[in-house]
Image (tube, grey):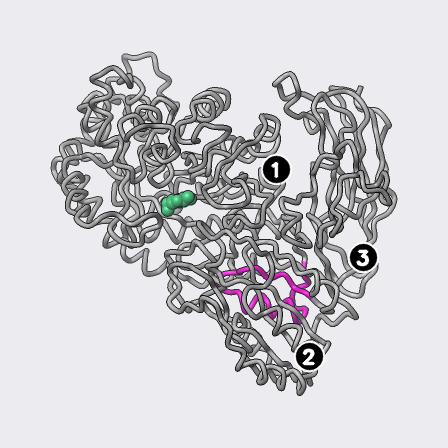
Amino acid sequence: MKFRTLSYILFVSLFAILSCNSTKTVVDRNSAKSSVSIKVDSVLKLMTLEEKIGQMNQYNGFWDVTGPSPKEGQAAGKYANLKKGLVGAMLNVKGVKEIRAIQKIAVEETRLHIPLLFGFDVIHGYKTISPIPLAEAASWDLEAIRNSAAMAAEEASAVGLNWTFAPMVDISRDARWGRVMEGAGEDPYLGSKIAYARIKGFQGDDLSSVKSIAACAKHFAGYAFAEAGRDYNSVDVSEATLQNIILPPFKACVDADVKTFMNSFNDLNGTPATGNAYLQRKILKGDWGFNGFVVSDWGSINEMIAHGYAKDSKEAATIAANAGSDMDMESYSYLENLATLVKEGKVKESLVDEAVRRILTVKFELGLFDNPYKYCDEVREKETVGKAAFQEGVLDVAKKSIVLLKNGGNLLPLAKSGLRIGLIGALAADKTSPLGSWRIGADDNTAVSVWEGLQKYKGNQVNYAKGADLTVGQTKFVSELHLNTTDRSGFQEAIDLAKSSDVVIMVLGEHGLQTGEGRSRTDLGLPGLQQELLEEVFKVNKKIVLVLNNGRPLALPWAADTIPAIVEAWQLGTQSGNAIAQVLYGDYNPSGKLPMTFPRNVGQVPIYYNYKNTGRPTMNEPESVFWSHYSDSSNKPLYPFGFGLSYSKFEYSNLKLSAGTLTKAGTLDVTVTVKNSGQVKGKEVVQLYIRDLVGSTTRPVKELKGFEMIELAPKEEKTVHFTIDEKMLQFYTANGKWEAESGDFKVFVGGNSADTLESNFKLQ
Ligand code: NOJ
């Protein structure tokens, strides 16, 4: 109570009175929603136009910039505006002490005492870091993913935050784009399931719980389709691709009751997303009935000037506000222009009211009006950050995220004693890189390295040689840069170590900050000298386990052909080294499956499993020139979507459909037998794909429509069931509607998208 000033108590009492008066209105008093809207309206009535516009303004804090840095002297102006009630939300303010101090200005020094939202990019954890989201998607374990988001929310809420800019639900097909690490990969079905799980994890069952924070579905929309995979680049996609591929995970977020959306930097088919009324007003707020608010991306309102879509900041504000962008992140454009625009009649005040209503609603739902300092408890902060249960939780999801790509001669799992292990690669000892990109709340050097993880197994002797420094290219936030390493002086030590080892573990890949925002690449190989190092070591010892650390699919055809064992270990967060060690030693039997196709070479990109057949598909005339192919590369990926091995061996048989025909109101049962013919217990993700053979628009060769994770003991077999109904066959047709079209369909079931059993049916 001590933090509540008299004026704040008066303010809360005013709500109580206003709410009591509502008995006279035609309102369902049992409905939480309607009572919130009464309170929101009561606040809105008290607000001047300037104060309303203030709610639509979000400032970055004065440190930890996640976009272009603010200019000198802006801090003073920001403090002044805070006091005037001209700020609705902040971002990048860290820790209870700082957040409380700023909240205090809003709550105790402004005329209306409206609390602030505090947003932060809690993308895969705040200080305790989970695997990068792409890695988590490889777990296909929705409960583990939900739990990871819930832990992140609990930790973030304990440091005072009440809003995360996550999940990123952009479907990505282009590994050159640095932000593929932040999403769930290439598939709209898997992406939708994961989006839903993440929203539920962040927001919990009750948004007003102190452990819940508001989530943000981003980037609306099309951002991952940036031409040539270059971040912020233009996006040109058909309506069919927008509807069938890009939008479904966003819709899943609305279904999960996400409280906020973020629009995106890109232009979409000629209109910047930030100024796109079709996306924000028609689809999101109209068709889908989204009742939260939309925040712009960092400075994206003013970026419409550079896009060549607005001539100045005033025009940009007009376009953004009319198009449904409710809050301006760091453009200052609403604050500078909206009042004039309302007075000139270029933006209706009713639209401002609508935006403010949406923003205040989220503040009420979070419980900030009841207690604006509810997340500001130093004791809870101390007890919560980094707690043991989080360490266990992130280790659990890290193990589940690892994908075994190759295991020639059953090199893995390693024996627990009697081995001389040579551990090679700069990443093997790195304690920062495993945290990945977007972990701005975490401290450097806080991840368990692979070297440390392996040392917990005392039976073997592990010796380490770096081999070469990592080339990280031009990047920010890395304390030590090796822009273009040409120093091979460590090679000999690595080669000598390999010669005297029974088995070599090479940890190679990308530094954690080589992916993420602004980190697109044109080469998908191992950066720097790593490929050369790998080949040199292979000359002296063929028993190599290649552990990959990377934030995007890599193109490693030589390694895939030559190296006996390959483990895709992404950037796994705080517990990285422990998770990797447990998989290498078989204490966890790998169960992950790729959420993105791995190409053979960068020229194949964008490459994805749910491609269209074309008029000249590959199987027709392989010996002829005139078919859809490359003259210098196979069309096939290095590793397909859904692929991942196990120390168990799974055999699929007996694919059966309950009937040959599906009626529009009926269902079809699909059954398949899966047997573990290996020696150890293991988990398998059984995947169901469907192909619609003829459509009013061309259809993909395969679409994921269901999956189930099963666990089988050695020699055990299970019958797995899926149900097909008409809804699963719907797509955005040539009529501009979601509907299923009757005709022939194929059904595929298997352990990855390329290796499946097949059957078929008709939709009547
Ligand atoms: C820009 C990024 O695109 C967005 O995802 C992020 O949330 C904001 N910056 C804030 O850091």
Q: Quadrant of residue 247?
A: top right
Q: Name the residue under label 2.
A: 503
Give me the residue at 34% from left, 33% from top. 305
The stretch of residues the image draws in magenta is: 566-590
Residue placed most toward the observer, 165 or 64: 64
Residue placed most toward the observer, 324 or 722: 324
Real-space Cα separation, disc 1 to disc 3, in angstroms? 29 Å
Residue 394 within the segment the image draws in magenta: no
Real-space Cα separation, disc 2 to disc 1, in angstroms? 40 Å
Q: Does residue 723 appear in the picture of this structure? A: yes
Ligand 1 neighbours mark 2 (CB distance < 8 Å): no
Ligand 1 neighbours mark 3 (CB distance < 8 Å): no
Tell me the element at label 3: strand
Q: How crowded is mark 1: few (under 14 residues within 10 Å), some or many (20 or more)?
A: many
Give me the residue at 72% from left, 30% from top. 699
Residue placed most toward the observer, 37 or 486: 486
Give me the residue at 44% from left, 50% from top. 518
Q: What number is the disc on residue 676?
A: 3
